[in-house]
Image: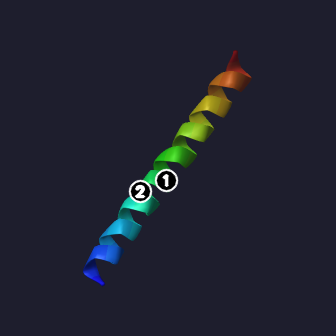
Amino acid sequence: MFLSREKKAKIDRLRILLTLLDFYITDVGTRY
């Protein structure tokens, strides 16, 4: 149970990073 919880935390962190990266790419693409 602890393992799956840690894996879920990693997936959530990856999802947040991907969302931030997507926002950044969209911002740069709109700016230039």
Q: Tell me where residue 7 sits by quadrant.
A: bottom left
Q: Is residue 5 left or right of residue 27?
A: left
Residue at the extreme right of the image, as rendered? 30
The residue under the point 41% across, 56% down is: 13
| Closer-to-camera residue (29/18) | 18
Is residue 13 depicted above or below 29 in this figure?
A: below
Which residue is at 67% across, 32% downward? 26
Callout 1 secondary element: helix
Give the image location of residue 17, x and y in percent: 47, 47
Q: Which residue is mark 2?
A: 13
Q: Which mark is residue 16?
A: 1
Q: For this rendering, which residue is in front, 27 or 4?
A: 4
Kindly indicate whether the residue at mark 1 contacts the one at mark 2 (C-beta within 8 angstroms): yes
What's the amino acid at mark 1?
A: Ile
Question: In the picture, which quadrant includes the N terminus?
Answer: bottom left
Label 2: how many residues lie within 10 Å, few (<14), some (14-19) or many (20+)? Answer: few
Label 2 sits on what residue type? Arg
Judged left or right of residue 3, residue 28 is right
Q: Secondary structure at mark 2?
A: helix
Q: In the image shown, does 12 or 1 lie closer to the viewer?
A: 1
Q: Classify residue 25 by image quadrant.
A: top right
User: In the shown orientation, is residue 16 left or right of residue 23?
Assistant: left
